[in-house]
Image (cartoon, rainbow, N blue to C red):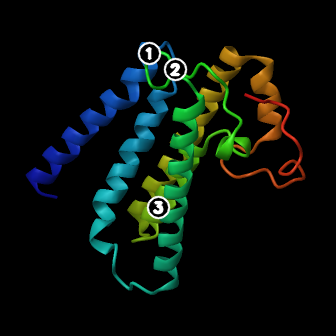
């Protein structure tokens, strides 16, 4: 690694630290702390793997990687669209005033973190070595912990409505255990 690499990695991590913690801590919420580690790991994974993005372009590993990256994009676009349309954030972007149960949120509680998990797996598959395996695992754990912390925050904010919503939806993947097609109890 060159000194330029170190400077870039340090600068990006300082930005991610600010971005991850500023909004959540300003609102008295703490999900930004583990989210920083997920974002940082995802950046490092991308930094170390970007040279391999088009190696063996039509191998099964690369095809699965691209499918995961496109699934990540699908989750993200849908999540952002419905968040902006229905969450009605007050002040800070993360301060949703409405519980969303429309669109992708009808099936998933955390489509944005699901998007980041698919992104992590897609980037990991570009060059799955030992270092990438460790970083990807830590990212997945960090995003899972972030979602769990945020669940607690949403329960405190929306109470029993969120508890009912939680029972009817999957965390990162749709709940296919029979709840997928039943009418949702939470309507906004």
The numbered mark at residue 95 is 2
In the image, 86: left or right of 132?
right
Q: Are marks 1 and 2 in contact (CB under 8 Å)?
A: yes
Split into 4 quadrants, where in the image is the C terminus? top right
Q: Does the rendering let one see residue 130?
A: yes
The residue wearing badge 3 is: 133
Q: Nearer the viewer, residue 58 or 128?
A: 58
Q: In which quadrant will I find the N terminus?
A: bottom left
Sort mark 2 into few (<14), some (14-19) or many (20+) by Cα contacts within 10 Å: some
In this rendering, would 180 be left or right of 28? right
The location of residue 170, given as percent across then percent down, is 74, 45
What element does badge 3 sit on? Answer: helix
Residue under the image location 79 percent in, 26 percent down = 163
Question: Residue at (43%, 19%) from the top-left corner?
Answer: 92
Q: Please tell me which of labels 1 and 3 falls first in the chain.
A: 1
The CA distance from mark 1 to mark 3 is 38 Å
- Residue 83: image quadrant is top right
Estimate the x, y position of residue 158 in percent, counting from the top left.
70, 18
- How many numbered marks, from 0 up? 3
Give 83 or 39, whichever is nearer the viewer: 83
Residue annotated with mark 1: 91
Vertical placement of 90 versus 63: above or below? Answer: above
Tag in front: 1 or 3: 1
Taking the spot 27% from the left edge, 71% from the top edge, the residue there is 51
């Amino acid at each position: 690694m060159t000194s330029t690499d170190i400077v870039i990695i340090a600068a990006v991590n300082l930005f991610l630290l600010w971005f991850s913690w500023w909004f959540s801590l300003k609102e008295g919420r703490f999900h930004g702390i583990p989210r920083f580690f997920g974002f940082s790991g995802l950046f490092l994974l991308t930094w170390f793997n970007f040279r391999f993005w088009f190696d063996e372009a039509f191998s099964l590993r690369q095809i699965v990687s691209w499918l995961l990256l496109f699934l990540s994009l699908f989750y993200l676009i849908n999540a952002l669209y419905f968040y902006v349309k229905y969450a009605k954030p007050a002040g800070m972007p993360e301060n949703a005033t409405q519980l969303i149960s429309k669109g992708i949120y009808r099936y998933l509680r955390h489509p944005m973190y699901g998007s980041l998990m698919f992104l992590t797996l897609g980037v990991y598959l570009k060059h799955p070595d030992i270092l990438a395996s460790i970083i990807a695992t830590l990212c997945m754990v960090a995003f899972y912990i972030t979602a769990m912390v945020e669940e607690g925050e949403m329960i405190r904010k929306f109470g029993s409505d969120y508890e009912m919503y939680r029972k009817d939806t999957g965390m990162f993947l749709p709940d296919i255990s029979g709840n997928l097609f039943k009418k949702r109890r939470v309507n906004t």
